[in-house]
Image (spheres, helix red, strand yellow):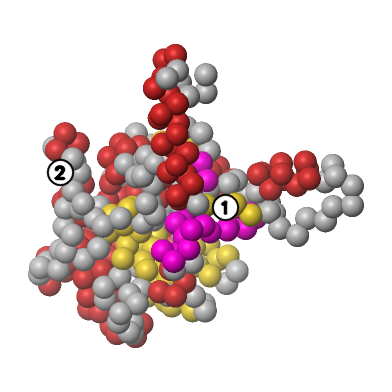
Amino acid sequence: VSPRVLRPQIRKTCRDIEERIARVTDSKRTPIDLYNGAKSTKATRETRMEVVAWLAICKYDCKLEGGFVRNWVVGHYTGRPANLLKSPKDWIETVDNLPSLKKEVVPCDLDCHLPSHAYFDIDKFQDDLYKYGISCTVSRQDWRYVLLLDENEPTGPFTMDLIEPHVVLTHDRIDFDVNNLSLEKDYTHELGIRIDIERKPYSIELETIVDNIKNKRFQLLRPRDFGVNYRINKMTQVCGWTQIGPDLSVLPDPHFKYYAILVPLSRSAALYTEVSNKIKSISSVQIISVEEIKNPYLEETYEGMKKLIGKQCTQRNPNE
C-alpha cells in the first residue's frame, strides 16, 4: 500500500511522528544537519541510527521496515539492559556467527530492503558511514548483509539488515500488524503498509496500527509456530506489549493472472498439528503437506453474502 498521511483526527496528535519520519526520509537534509545527528554533543544512539537510515533510504533508495519504524519512529520507545547501562559493548551477542543485540535493547536494529532498480555497493555505503564517524563491520549471507555499527561508541551499538531485492519478493507474510509499516524516500509525512491488511476480511487500517503502537498492543497475523511464539514472548514478556484480538492468518494475494494461491503451513504451526491430528484418524493416510488457500474472489463473495443474509436476520447477525 503506497505511503499516505494519517487522517486529520489522528494526524493532529502525531506531529512528532511526522518529524521523525522526515528525519530519515527527507532527501533535502543537509550534511551539517546529518553531522549534528551523528557527532554533536546532543547526538544519541537513536539520532545516529536515523543518520544511517537516512543514508540507506535517501542515497541508496532502500525501503525501511520493521522494529525501528515501530519502536522509534512511531512509538518513540527506548530500552536498555538494566544491568549493562555502563557497558554498551556487552549488549552485543553472536548467534550463528552473526552479530545481534540483547532483546532488552530498543530500538534494536534497522531492517532495509535493497532496491531492485539500482546496484548496491556495500563498500561505498561503508565510506559514507565513515564520513559521519560511524564504524561498520559487515557479515555476508546469500540473501542479506548484516552490519554491526558503532561497536565501540559510548552511545551504544546497533545492527542493520540489508535484504536483497529478490528475497523481498518472498517476504510476503507478516507476523504482527505493528510490524507492517514502511518508510520511503521523500515521503516525509507518510507511512506505508507493506502487506495490504486494510481490505476485508482483515480491515486493519493505518490509523489502527499507529494507535496500537502508541498503546503497546499488537495483533497476530499468521499461524503460530516456534518462531512466531518466540516473537510473541519477546513482545509480551520483555517489551511489555499486549496481544489483542483473534489470531488471523493473512495470506498474500495471488498473481493477477491466477485466481488462488496455496501457502504451505509450517509443521510446527498449531493449525498444522490440529488439522493433521484429525486427518490421522483415517487409517493408512500419509500427510504430504498441509496448505492454506487464498481466493480473493471467493472471499469477496462470502463477505457480500454475509451482508445480504445479515440484513434479513435478527440484530443483523448472519450466523442466526
Q: Is residue 292 left or right of residue 73?
A: right
Q: Is residue 200 left or right of 23 when viewed as pictured?
A: right
Q: Earlier in the sequence, mark 1 or mark 2?
A: 2
Examine the rendering and report whether any part of residue 246 can be seen.
Answer: yes
Q: Which residue is mark 1?
A: 293
Name the kind of residue labelled 2 in the image.
Arg
How far apart marks 1 and 2 lie (CA) works out to: 41 Å
Can you give x and y, in whole percent of width and height, for residue 45 in the image?
30, 58
Q: Magenta segment, principal secondary structure?
A: loop
Mark 2, Cα crowd under 10 Å, few <14 / some 14-19 / many 20+, is few
> Is residue 57 rendered magenta in the image?
no
* Residue ID at (45%, 34%): 305
Position of 34 relative to 65 (above/below)? below
Q: Position of residue 232 (x, y in %)?
A: 53, 43
Taking the spot 45% from the left edge, 42% from the top edge, the residue there is 301
Can you give x and y, in whole percent of width and height, for residue 308 in the image?
A: 41, 29
Residue at point 26% right, 76% down? 60
Residue nearest the viewer, comparing 115 with 138: 115
Q: Using the rendered image of the protein, determine whether residue 149 is visible from the camera's viewpoint.
A: no
Q: Which residues are magenta?
A: 248-266
Residue at image position (52%, 52%) is 294
Q: Is residue 255 magenta?
A: yes
Residue assigned mark 2: 15
Instruction: In the rendered view, tell whether residue 191 sits above or below residue 171.
Output: above
Identify the residue at the far right of this view. 284
